[in-house]
Amino acid sequence: MTQLAPHLTAFLREHLPRERRASVHTCDAYAYSFQLLVTFAARRLRKRPCLLQIEDLDVPMILAFLEHVEEARGNKARSRNARLAAVKSFFRYLEHRVPAVLDQALRVHAIPMKKVDEALVASLSRAEVQALLDAPDRRTPSGIRDRAMLHLAFAGGLRVSELVGLALDQFDGRSPASIHIIGKGRRERVLPLWQETAAAIRAWVAVRPKDGDTALFLNKAGRAMTRAGFEYILTKHAAVAAKVVPSLAAKPISPHVLRHSCAMHMLQATRDIRKVALWLGHATLQSTEIYLRADPAEKLEMIDALAPLGIKPGKFRPPDKLIAMLAAR
């Protein structure tokens, strides 16, 4: 039997951040996945979490945990798959360090991911975006900060982790203004900013507390803005904007919806999916193709390009009794 705690600690504190150079967001997500798994296994086995063995995390235990994630916690298949991906990554780490669990690791790797529904992305119209950007009160420091964050989240198409993780020195206010982004997978990109977005950020920098954290966006305590903090800000101003544009009240508003909106508007303006992928920091075009499915303009162009075939529809006549029976079903 092999103690779980020392290997899990080394995986989360050394392997992920140092060897794999995973982002802080990825490390936190993996740690939370194992917090859920260890708590579940300890309760099920009536053990203290620090006394769990690697062998306790066998396939039946992991399957039971994944079922718990979906049914008891009410998470969707995508969240279930994220938890499973963290577990598989840990067992890949163990394969070269604890040979005794190799067979167990192979069985864990065989657990399939669950298929997820690929719904069309939600996005906002230009009028809805403008109402949201105009919602903060520019007369207060917090309103100036909120307006700058909303502008940058939309114009840059930033992930919320990228937005709240920005440092003050990543903003270059010289003309033309730009922002240096360290994105998912530590991929870096530099985005030029619209004049209005740059002006909103400059206005915030002018009133930003000088003795706080090094982050670009600070909360009232002078510390870096958190994901939850920005989500609260977005929800608050979306409620105000919905009074101006009522259609906002019926739409789900989240930081990622702003990213989707940026991508959709950019695709409609450029008609070039490669430029959209470059702007969003996608590693492959496959991630960007979801916006093609949501954009009706591409499909309308296909309809316009196709000439009517003018073929009179016929009636299928099965050549055999067996084929006729199969066709009837």
Image (cartoon, grey):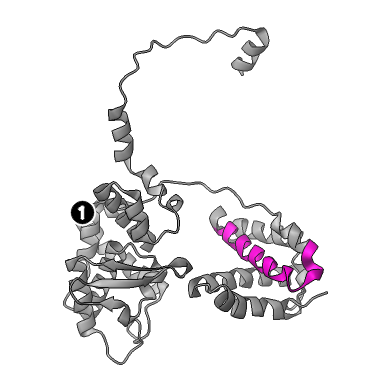
Where is residue 188? Give x, y as percent: 39, 69
Tell me the magenta residue range. 79-103
Instruction: Name the residue nearer the viewer: 64 or 295.
Output: 295
Instruction: Name the residue nearer the viewer: 93 or 293.
Output: 93
Name the quarter where the C terminus is drawn. top right
Above or below, 58 against 127 in this view is below
Above or below, 229 against 114 in this view is below
Where is residue 10? Give x, y as percent: 65, 79
Q: Residues within 10 Å of mark 1 (few under 14, many from 20)?
A: few
Q: Is residue 76 left or right of residue 262?
A: right
Name the quarter where the N terminus is drawn. bottom right
Q: What secondary structure is marked by label 1?
A: helix
Q: Is residue 157 left or right of residue 4?
A: left
Residue ID for mark 1: 127
Where is residue 186? Give x, y as percent: 46, 70
Q: Is residue 271 left or right of residue 194?
A: right
